[in-house]
Image: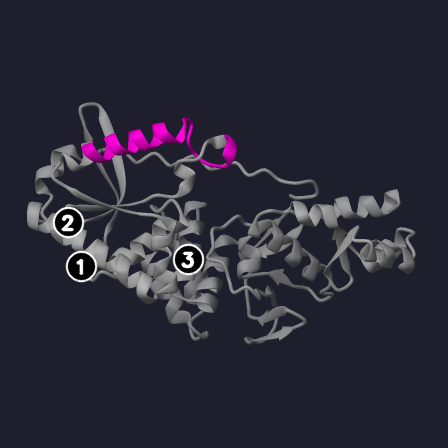
């Protein structure tokens, strides 16, 4: 590689097209040799990246973003990255698509969509204010992206995206405005259902799925972020039905910050803190169920695993109802008056060439 080719890769987040490489002074034979020797990887037909760089991308987000960038570089007509392809540049939390996930772009024109060479081209109208720019890519903003995912991927995927958008600052009014513009579009009713349910109070995909799992028990819609305060101490729980609380436990809660988690102490200290915290909360005559990621995700996969989790949660919830009832009026004096502090975002390390 010569310095001009390296400069092209640096300017395009590690990617270079065959035409760009030739214009930088490389011959087609040089390009093909780099691919045969494993120095370069074909990210998409006619688009290359250094193999070492591709292998350094450990997350689904970064791998998907590289593929979408490569696809965008091959599309000559004006387009906007949309759906999941805009969610990743926006850092929105999303449910993963199928293993054969396609790049999604939206182009001006009539309503409809078609697939071509692994890219889904959506011909849907949009307003200029719905478009944003992230690291050189034209993408839809969080509200439009969440609504598109709701229509394309269904209710659960839509709620995950919508709540992530709300955590990033998108308002319910913005989501409803986008939904109003989709009236008459296929699956627009799903968008309305998602927007009606979405809340900015969940902190993660796991909490969103846990809320849907609790709803599936059939005892009502849980309250989000229920807090108790007494004796100079305050604790918040993810979900509440009556006097029963549901907590989602992601592994990041027990991993140290330098390992990609949130813990500032060792795992055993975190476990001890959680044990004492649960004892304190249950001292108010409440019950508690805890859910890990595999259990929360059963609301997506369904089947016998979901039935087992539902049976356990139902058993624990009914036990709390039998022991303590469902009324919480006696807890009014212990409810926090201020807003719940938001958790700090987790820093993400980026490899060379990444945004």
Spatial separation of the CA atoms under disc 1 and disc 2: 10 Å
* Residue 10 located left or right of residue 270: right
Secondary structure state at the residue bearing disc 3: helix
Label 1 close to label 2 by CB (< 8 Å): yes
Spatial separation of the CA atoms under disc 3 and disc 2: 30 Å
Secondary structure state at the residue bearing disc 1: loop
Give how far across and how far down residue 174 sits, in percent: 42, 55
The residue beneath circle 3 is 175
Q: Residue 123 or 64: which is nearer the viewer?
A: 64
Q: Residue 310 or 227: which is nearer the viewer?
A: 310
The residue beneath circle 1 is 219
Neighbours of disc 2 within 10 Å: few (<14), some (14-19), many (20+): some
Q: Residue at x 32, y 60 (%)?
A: 196
| Residue 89 makes an appearance in the image | no
Is-magenta flag for residue 73? Answer: no
Neighbours of disc 3 within 10 Å: few (<14), some (14-19), many (20+): many
Precedes in sequence: disc 1 or disc 2: 1
Give how far across and how far down residue 194 sits, in percent: 36, 61
Q: Residue 132 or 286: which is nearer the viewer?
A: 286
Give how far across and how far down residue 40 sits, in percent: 78, 53
The residue beneath circle 2 is 242
* Residue 344 located left or right of residue 223: right
Q: Residue at x 26, y 56 (%)?
A: 214
Precedes in sequence: disc 3 or disc 2: 3
Precedes in sequence: disc 1 or disc 3: 3
Secondary structure state at the residue bearing disc 2: loop
The residue range painted magenta reads 258-279
Is-magenta flag for residue 270? Answer: yes
Quarter of the figure with residue 354: top right
């Amino acid at each position: 590689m010569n310095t001009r080719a390296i400069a092209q890769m640096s300017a395009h987040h590690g990617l270079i097209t065959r035409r760009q490489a030739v214009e930088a002074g490389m011959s087609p034979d040089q390009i093909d040799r780099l691919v045969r020797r494993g120095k370069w990887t074909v990210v998409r037909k006619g688009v290359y990246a250094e193999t070492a760089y591709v292998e350094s991308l450990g997350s689904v987000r970064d791998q998907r973003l590289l593929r979408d960038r490569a696809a965008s570089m091959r599309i000559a007509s004006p387009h906007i990255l949309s759906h999941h392809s805009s969610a990743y540049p926006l850092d929105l939390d999303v449910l993963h698509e199928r293993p054969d996930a396609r790049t999604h772009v939206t182009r001006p024109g009539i309503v409809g969509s078609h697939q071509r060479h692994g890219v889904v081209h959506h011909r849907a109208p949009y307003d200029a204010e719905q478009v944003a720019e992230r690291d050189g890519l034209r993408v839809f903003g969080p509200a439009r992206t969440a609504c598109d995912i709701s229509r394309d991927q269904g209710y659960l995927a839509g709620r995950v995206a919508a709540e992530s958008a709300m955590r990033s600052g998108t308002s319910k009014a913005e989501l409803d405005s986008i939904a109003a513009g989709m009236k008459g579009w296929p699956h627009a009713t799903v968008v309305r259902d998602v927007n009606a349910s979405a809340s900015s109070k969940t902190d993660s995909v796991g909490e969103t799925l846990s809320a849907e799992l609790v709803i599936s028990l059939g005892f009502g819609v849980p309250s989000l972020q229920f807090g108790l305060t007494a004796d100079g101490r305050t604790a918040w729980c993810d979900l509440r039905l009556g006097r029963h609380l549901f907590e989602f436990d992601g592994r990041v809660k027990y991993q140290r910050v330098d390992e990609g988690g949130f813990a500032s102490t060792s795992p055993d200290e975190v476990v001890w803190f959680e044990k004492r915290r649960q004892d304190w909360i249950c001292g108010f005559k409440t019950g508690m169920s805890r859910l890990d990621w595999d259990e929360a995700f059963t609301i997506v996969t369904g089947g016998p695993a979901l039935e087992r989790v539902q049976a356990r949660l139902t058993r624990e919830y009914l036990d709390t109802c039998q022991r303590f009832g469902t009324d919480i009026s006696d807890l009014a004096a212990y409810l926090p008056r201020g807003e719940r502090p938001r958790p700090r975002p987790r820093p993400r390390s980026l490899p060379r060439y990444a945004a």
